[in-house]
Image (tube, rainbow, N blue to C red):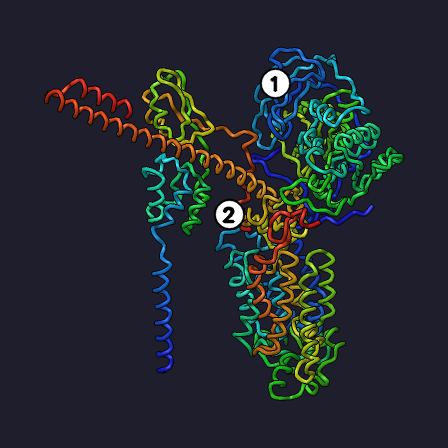
Amino acid sequence: MTQIPPMSGPYLRKNKSVRRSMLLVMAALTPATAYGFYLFGWPAIILFSITLGSALVFEVICLLIAKRSVSMFALDGSAILTAWLLAISLPPWAPWWIAVVGSGIAIVIGKQVFGGLGQNVFNPAMVARVALLISFPLEMTTYMQPLVIFSEGAPTFMDSMSIIFGAGNFDAVSSASLLDTIKTDLGQGVPLGEIMDGRYSPANWILGNSISSIGEGSALLLILGGIALIFGRIITWYIPVSTIVALGVIATIFNLIDPSQYPDAMVHLFSGATMLAVFFIATDPVTSPMSPKGQIVFGIGLGLLVYIIRTWAAYPEGVSFAILLMNAMTPLIDRYVRPRIFGRTQKGTPLNLSEKS
Amino acid sequence: MLEAILSLTALGIVLGTILGLAARYLKVEGNPLVEEIEQMMPGTQCGQCGYPGCAPAAEGLVKGEAEVTLCPPGGKSLAAALAEKLGVEVDLSKMENKDKALAFVNEDLCIGCTRCFQVCPTDSLLGAPQQLHTVISDICTSCEDCIDICPTGALSMVVVEKTVQTWHWPMPKSHNKETTL
Amino acid sequence: MEIFDIQGGAKLDGRKSLTADLAIIKMPIPNILHIPLQQHIGAPAEPIVNHGDRVLKGQLIASSKGVISAPIHSPTSGTVKRIGDFTAPHPSGLPVLTLTLEPDGLDEWTELPDPLDMETATSQEIADRVSNAGIVGMGGATFPSAVKLNLGKRFNLEMLVINGAECEPYLTCDDRLMQERTEKTVMGIKVMMKALGVPKALIAIETNKPLAFKAMEKECANDGNIHIVHVPARYPMGSEKHLVQALTGKETPAKGMTADLGVVVHNVATAFAVYEAIYMGRPLISRIVTVSGQVIKKPGNYETLIGTPVSSLIELSGGMTGTPKQLLMGGPMMGQPLPNLDVPIIKGSSGVLALKDTEIKDKNVMPCIGCGSCVMVCPVALLPLDMASRIQHDDIDGADTIGVRDCVSCGSCNYVCPSHIPLVQYFNYAKGSLKKQDVDRRNQDRMKTLAQNRALRDEKNLLALDRKRADRQAYKAAMSKMISNKPDSNDKGHETDNGLDIK
């Protein structure tokens, strides 16, 4: 009847669980991912499956080594979600070993060595992405022109197997992403207007018929997924909105100062990993601050860092670096940005009634 | 090369001088830590720690001879405070909060010899020669000094039973490594 | 009227429909009554009857001890069977001093005091009557009500707030009381206003109780000083400080009382008890208890004698359909688990819940994923996840610095946590440990002073002894010089004796 030792109340629980949250995030990612499969065809699907499968294997091995409950943790959805996020941020035709190494880094180094679920300091998917980007820059920046699945010229399943496993040669137009191109060409003194000419149309970016990673193609679908998560109360609006505002504002300012050097806010917001990151990666509960105020600080910092890294650092895509840097800042933000406790001042002393009135 | 060597040397000389001056002019007399720690101790000089009193125990702590968990009357809270003060790591979870026990006089055995209240550090034992002695439980420090001195074994330590007023919720039982928060 | 926002809070599944439409039923007298002598916050009452005495209904059986205490009266006529330890309705399952009464079935009243004339009664007279009737806060806090009715003396009060929010799920006892005993409750409220000397009263009722709202509004239609206010059904609206914030927009300072803002809050059931004491002269000997949960055959609101064993209450109501997964006294959010079915109903027991496992949804505890849901719902704006992790790592002082003592244990964080971490228990554990630490520290300081005093005294005695010895030696030397060189054996013996004496 009553347990010994007794368990304290409350004895009601909201119908929520870690697994349910993870599944809902995956559900929100599904449209953008499915669209990525459609755009990039079988290679993307195969790469995605390899990433998820190997992540699960790594997770189970780690749990066995740590002697923790496999049934409880391996199926909590966190490893699959991590692998999912990593997979859709890979170039669609990347070789199989990129997927396996990435999964290993994400699960083993990014998550399990910290103590597993909830203990990691950095977002595991971003740890893997950055590690891959630095170690294998060629594989990680070779993007493809979209070849819609089942269309003429698109690789068949067997073609795709050989692409991913590196057995055969398949003719396709490889290309650099827009941010890559801007970075390289600007560096060679080509004016921005010329670079952008014909390569950039906002409609394309938003709908997602572009050169990108598997799941980053359609900003629109990502935004819709993110909004669904906000309304489903899985994530809060604080980080997405503050990041978008901060990135938009700083991009607009520099664009106004010198339009020939600095692309406008639209380019920054709708290209690359921005939308994927602000809705699905930066909002990772484990590695973002706990209080709403802290999350806003986090979002602003993230937006500014993304811009700074993209514009002045060596890497054209700054999102993953920016996220890792802000992850590192999170404990600090949590320490200093705290809500004001009921009946107390921000400093923690009880409210003084006579002073107030 | 030469520049680097010169500038580093200069830097070394300047900083060294500053440190030397600081050591001379900002010198602290004695060891204030011992005093501070003695202040934190219960101060009943009960000797349960093996030192003859709280001051020697404080010295022992500062010298690193003694564990911060040495003081039974101070309990877990004192150990935590000492660990923080001395900057040592200590696993307090193993130090169970010992059930508080108080001295108790068995009235059938007490002969009124007065020895017990001569050793009681807080005057919590009362009585007169040839009359029964008794314990004021409010101010008994659980030092057990009286137990050994009693010639008839009339004194014993009796564990204080928990009441609804003193009970509090225990740590949740899910307290394990599976679910580190 | 404008309702102000309160921070955080959770929207709960009320589950009140089980009992909300059922009229209050008077429970018959059970075979045995166990009346604990501590049913309130403060010092336990002291029994004034003996084993074997016959007592009458309403007779004083234990008197209050000290300012913060409440007397206890016999719920019916009968014989005192035993005065001794009996398991309390408390999660610890520890015993408290309890008076066991065997009812004789006659239900014979003692002589009751005359009703107070409200035209002439002074504030002190009202408070005294309430105090003598043993009335305590019936929302569950069980703070002696008379103390809170006397606050007009120390504070500049503006209004009385009657708490009819009843924000805990399942419970409907206040809802039914307001619907069925409207007139008496409002009369009780007017008495309280007079005792406090306030011109205005607000009765706060959550929007999920439209019938109670209507009934109270009708009753107070002609009274310009009492207003009925709808407050949103958001847990924990019934928390005193939050209710005051919702009604006035003002925030009670930490460690302060709502009286600092000029507001005193009383529960609506307390108002009814006050009515009974003032107009009928009756002490608090029974209360309305919601008996609910899916294991209960006939859920409902039962007017129950204080001291009725929970088992009798459940049996008399119709019994249970099986073994409950959780047996509770109070609501499911802040209620306490019961150690067994024999424990009695006390003055603060608003409900007895026997819950099925499907109602509880007890799940595996997972690690914290830092989702911040708990931060969003905390009505006190704490960081529950941070506090819990510090407490888990034995850093209770660390949890203290970030406000664990401000936690009201409402359980909102626990309710929304997707990892099902027993947050409230961590906080209750920490609060209990901190309280113990405070007591220990205070005791230690006191003992330190005692020990120092003793040491000083010992030192003085030794000094005095030394001086005595020196004097004696000087005297001896002088004597021996004066008379002869022969030593006096007697003197020596004396000295050793003396030495022993002090040693």
Q: Relative to the observer, which residue lies in front, A95 or B49?
A: B49
Pinpoint the chain carrying mark 2: C
Q: Is residue A231 left or right of residue C183?
A: left
Q: Amino acid at mark 1?
A: Pro
| Viewer-nearest of discs 2 and 1 | 1
Q: Relative to the observer, which residue lies in front, C65 or C330?
A: C65
Which residue is denoted by mark 2 in the rendering? C395
The quadrant of the picture occupied by the C terminus of chain C is: top left
Q: Is residue A126 left or right of residue A24?
A: left
- In primary-sequence order, the first of circles 2 and 1 is 1
Q: Is residue B31 left or right of residue C193?
A: left
Q: Amino acid at mark 2?
A: Asp
Same chain shared by disc 2 and disc 1: yes
What numbered label is drawn on residue C47?
1
Quarter of the view holding residue C348:
top right
Question: How many numbered discs sit on the rendered protein?
Answer: 2
Q: Are marks 2 and 1 in contact (CB under 8 Å)?
A: no
Q: Work out whether B99 lies above or below A134.
A: above
Does residue C35 show up?
A: yes
Position of residue C416 measured from the top left corner of the image (x, y, whole percent): 67, 48
Q: Relative to the observer, which residue lies in front, A286 or B3?
A: B3
Q: Relative to the observer, which residue lies in front, B8 or B23?
A: B23
Q: Work out whether C415 lies above or below C94.
A: below
**Distance of label 2 from label 1 (alpha carbons):** 42 Å
Task: Tell me the SS state at disc 1.
Answer: strand
Does residue A174 show up?
A: no
Crowd band around label 1 with a 10 angstrom C-alpha radius: few (<14), some (14–19), many (20+): some
Residue at 43 percent across and 49 percent down: it is: B85
What numbered label is drawn on residue C80?
none
Instruction: Farthest residue to the front: give it.
Output: C482
